[in-house]
Image (spheres, rainbow, N blue to C red):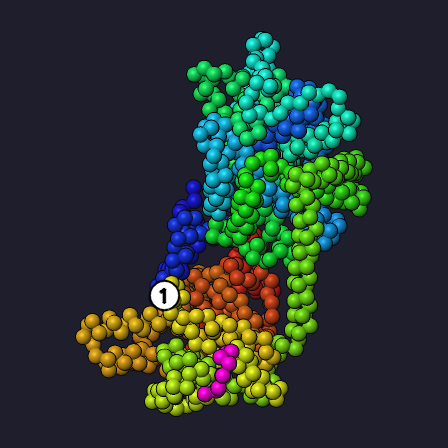
Amino acid sequence: MTEPDADLAPSSAAAGPAGGAVVPEPLGYRLKRLFLGAPLVTERLHEERLPNAMALGVLAPDCVSSAAYGTEQMLVELLPVFGLAAFSLVLSITGVVLALLVLLTLSYREVVQVYTKAGGSYVVARENFGPRVAQIAAVALLIDYVVTVAVQTAAGTVAVVSAIPVLGPYSLEITVGVVILLAYGNLRGIREAARAFALPTYLFTGAIAAVVVVGVIRELLGNLPRYDPATLPGAVPVGGGSGLALGVVVLTLARSFANGGSSLTGLEAISNGVSAFRKPEGVNARRVLVVMASTLGFLVAGVSWLAHLTHATPYESGYPSVISQEVRAVFGTGTLGTVLFDAVQAVTALILYTGANTSFNGFPFLASFVAGDSFLPRQLTKRGHRLVFSNGIIVLAVVAIALLVVSGGTVSALVPFYAIGVFTGFTMAGFGMTKYHLTHREAGWRRKLVINACGGGLSLLVVAIFAVVKFTEGAWAVVVLFPILVFALIRLNRQYREEEAALAALAPILDVEPNWARHVVLVFVDTLDLATLRALRYARGLRPTQIRAVHFVLDETRARRLAERWRRIQRGDVGLDLLECRDRRLGRASVELIRERTADGRTEVTVLLPRRVYAPVLGRLLHDRTADHIADRISRVPHAAATIIPFDVSGPVQRLSQAHRHGETFTDTRHRLTAQQPSDDGRRPVASEPEATQPQPITAADRSVPIPISELGDRGPATITGRINSVDLTASDGTPVLTCRVSDQTGSITARFYGRSHIKGVEPGRRIRLHGRPSRFADQLALTDPDYRLLPDEASDNVADGTAER
């Protein structure tokens, strides 16, 4: 078992490699660590893969759990029109649904075999139809994931209130709480989510299988009870079933089939999460897909058969559910039957709740793929604290909760939003694989083409049926929203492409030495305080042509006092300009000043904006965000740049308070702090520097034995091993220089490769062994053109030898 410390990312609260000062962690990070656990390092990413049994438990709940409400949704449409004949018709419609299940399973077997990255129908559509057409699949799946969370959690709450009716009035609150809990579990990482969510899949499958088997046995023995829908108070209306017009019959059957199609949602979860499987991903995903589809088919058929036998009837309030009535009929009302009933309801609620977890696995992966193609904000591509796509998880939870609140959290109200998204994904996957087979013509391509084309065509037919028969029940919202979202994704991609084009066009112009005749630094001054003095010091370090302090006069009395104080405290090398600003529009006045200074086209202006930093709450009370507003305006002016210079006021205040408590006078404190400050060239006084110690020279016999970086001296060759922290490309007299910062647990050193702009494999995070003679460069130890060897780590088996390359 992995040691606990191996899971932790290096904490910035610890002392640095060279024994530097402790950096305190912010409150937000400490809270995140408390609730989510220790952060996982990137090297652990390859470990976050699932074996087949665990993958079935994690990815199948959405699909398998739909057996709990699919039959009920069919009966909701059939009973008011066909009466008791609905319990026979439900078997026929279930048969059609199961036939479609078989066809789609065969189609998706080809998908997971060919496309072994997460993304499912989106990746299929992107590779075969191009990225723009693929956005149809992206929007379809994103909508499906959101609605899945809402439907599954709402159905889970129905199972709970079916067993505990007193909780019925609080159904929405329970459902929202479960969504929040699921989001929290997934933010902790996929492994923790797998352990928590895999078991209910097997418990539900076993429980419903037992109900079906016992129900069939009791029917054969002739003692399986049957409900009378006409005598059940609160049940949906039961029609007469006679004298129906053909149009009504066809419409009702179509609506029932559309509702029954919700049983197939979640079938795409395997293809959307192929990358979560262990190698070989395609083979393992194919096996799990077949097992999942077979399980779903058995459960849906069994629940529909029991409904046919027992006449279990949907209720207008949504509870008790049809499946709970079947369980009660099979196990009876005795003590043992009540215990078994409660157990089945518990595992039904668990599987339905955890069915929503499929979306929490699939949505972030899909969003990261779409964002990686520049059709969604790139923040969705970043992995968070526990190596999961945290932003995607949070977005999914927020939107799903909003949908629950708007719809009231009932399954019947949510189903009309459901199947359009998922069956559009089926359509894109089927037609995409059809295009793939026509293009590649691999072995057996004709048979595969027929399967995928039929799957795509029938899925498209289901989409059309659902859009028509469910239009007035809420499907209109999806029909309207769908093209809007597709357009929005394409528009966002155009913005990204325009930015890339601008970068390509302007990079050769901007990435050259500046040709300014003058560089002017302006320090905007509101008052003369420690933050302003810090900004002035920073300005001097820039070595500009000219430094000027600028104060926009909003209050003449205050301006005069500032000017007087400036003359008394400032050392006189920076003048203070007082500029009138009658209308108090600081942003506009700043832009006008900058344009005036840069009017010659040869002057570059840098504006420094001092900003005092306090504790977050106190800072918001004491100071506004004027600096951010001015910086935003200035950054849009050619030949101008704005930099906010933060200064933490609390540090000096605390040091002064501590000194005064120890009886130190103000003058003594000033002399002590002055002695601790670096001089203008950045070096501390020699007297305050600790005496350097020289390590023993490294002998030739030790060439292959790495030593700690902290023991390096500037004489004799040495070998060190560490991890690359950063890689920078600079230039020296026109010659490119690749600079790497390498560190181990004791310290860090710079390696400089002259005449090299890129070395394959030399990148942040890689382990490397260096051998060379340390020397002083910019007053720091460095290795110049050392021999190097990239070392294999957990994430890479490639080893490059620097000696061989050079």
Q: In the image, what residue type sits under mark 1?
A: Leu
Picture coordinates of residue 148, whole percent (x, y): 59, 40
Above or below, 208 relative to 526 = above
Picture coordinates of residue 515, whole percent (x, y): 61, 85
Magenta region includes residue 582: yes
Picture coordinates of residue 533, whole percent (x, y): 39, 81
Task: Name the foreground residue: 652 vs 774.
Answer: 652
Residue 83 is left or right of residue 10, and the answer is right
Callout 1 secondary element? helix
Picture coordinates of residue 790, whole percent (x, y): 54, 59
Above or below, 572 relative to 137 = below
Could you say which quadrant of the image residue 101 lies in?
A: top right
Quadrant occupied by the C terminus: bottom right
- Give the residue displayed 60% in from the left and 71% down from the top: 756
Above or below, 751 relative to 169 = below
Could you say which quadrant of the image residue 305 lies in?
A: top right
Task: Name the foreground residue: 370 vs 637.
Answer: 637
Could you say which quadrant of the image residue 710 lies in?
A: bottom left
- Give the residue displayed 27% in from the left and 82% down from the top: 671
Task: Name the foreground residue: 667 vs 736.
Answer: 667
Q: What residue range appears in magenta?
A: 578-586
Q: Is residue 137 visible?
A: no
Other residues around mark 1 within 10 Å, as few (<14) / some (14–19) / many (≥20): few
Q: Is residue 598 visible?
A: yes
Residue 513 is left or right of residue 387, and the answer is right
Q: Which residue is mark 1?
A: 618
Determine the residue located farthest toward the top in the rendered image. Answer: 221
Q: How many numbered markers are drawn?
A: 1
- Give the residue displayed 60% in from the left and 79% down from the top: 638
Magenta region includes residue 340: no
